[in-house]
Image: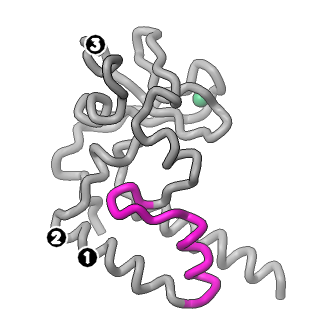
Amino acid sequence: MSSCCSDHATKIITGSCPKCGVFCKSIDNKTLYHQVKFPENQAAFQGKYYFCPSKECTVGYFSSTGHAIPKQHLRTYQEFKDDKLCYCFDINASYYLSALTANNADVIKNFVIQKTKSGDCACDVRNPSGQCCLAKFKILEKNNFLSKSAQL
Ligand SMILES: [Zn+2]
């Protein structure tokens, strides 16, 4: 299945966070301008920017030219701290995990898949990573499956 954002996203390159060293992906300027709070978003951003996905790291975005923007300066900072799973449709990871445990997660995921297919998602501006949320659904499902298997 193709990602909802693959049509308009430019080629993703990778880099490592200057603070925590974690593996990071580049983002589009569009994501940057929508995510960074006013007035910091009024700056003329130079070069390519990357998003640090680490929850522990204070760096939000950093550029190839050495500029860094703290996570606290992102409009989605609170959502990020709350483990938002899908920024487009406001679904928290904890909510999806309990749905997985209760075996009624499909209806939630199918809604997101359907909206993604019809182009009604907005990951490139809503999600600080600029990436499609669906990959994260799969990671949670896998972890949930593994933890269930471990209990048997
Ligand atoms: Zn980092």
What percent of the width, then of the height, locates residue 17? 56, 25
Circle 1 Cα neighbour tier, 10 Å, few/some/many (<14 / 14–19 / ≥20): few
What percent of the width, then of the height, locates residue 2? 27, 63
Which numbered tag is attached to residue 114?
1
Q: Amino acid at mark 3?
A: Ala
Tell me which corner region of the image, top left, top right, bottom left or bottom right, holds residue 89. Answer: bottom left
The residue located at (24%, 52%) in the rendering is 6
User: Is 93 above or below relative to 9?
Assistant: below
User: Is 49 above or below relative to 44?
Assistant: below
CA gap, disc 2 to disc 1? 6 Å
Give the residue pinned by disc 3. 43
The residue located at (41%, 42%) in the rendering is 129
Q: Quadrant of the C terminus?
A: bottom right
Q: Residue furthest right?
A: 151
Q: Amino acid at mark 2?
A: Ser
Kindly check if marks 2 and 1 are in contact, taking CB atoms under 8 A apart as contact: yes
